Image: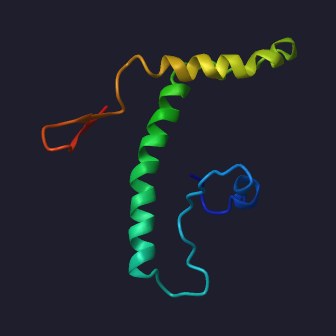
Amino acid sequence: MADKGFDIEEMLRGKNVKFNIPPFLKNQEQFSAQDVQTTKAISSLRIHVERAIRRIKEFHFFDSDIPLSMLGSINQLYTVACLLTNFPGPLILTGENGVGSTN
């Protein structure tokens, strides 16, 4: 999933990765009904991605300068932050009918 303007589809095609990007308006005056549905579907999922990113940022691991001596550990630090986000519980609490409140 990416924002408009990220032209990485070619790079991902060889890796057998599905690329989801909102449709562009291009030379049209308005979106087609299908484009509106696609945009809504991507946006509803994007909210959850943003919530997960917010949880990672709440650890403030990367708020200050990181010494060059720790450059080799950046991936490990980020992985730990991502793993720690699993402990507070799900991003979405589902109710009886499958629709729920959010954290």
- Residue 2: image quadrant is bottom right
Q: Is residue 98 above or below residue 25?
A: above
Residue occupying image coordinates x 57% and y 19%: 81
Which residue, as the protein is rendered here, is positioned at the far left?
Answer: 96
Residue 45 in the figure: left or right of residue 29: left
| Colour mode of the rendering | rainbow
Choose between 98 and 29: the one closer to the eye: 98
The image quarter in which residue 67 lies = top right
Residue 42 location, x and y as percent? 45, 57
Q: Position of residue 35 (x, y in %)?
A: 45, 74
Which residue: 43% across, 56% down?
43
**What count of labels does the image hold?**
0
Identify the residue shown where x is 74% and y is 54%: 14
Estimate the x, y position of residue 85 in percent, counting from the top left.
Answer: 47, 22
**Between 12 and 28, the one nearer to me in the picture:** 12
Q: Position of residue 102 (x, y in %)?
A: 29, 36
Q: Residue at x 36, y 32 (%)?
A: 91
Say above or below: 37 vs 32.
Answer: above
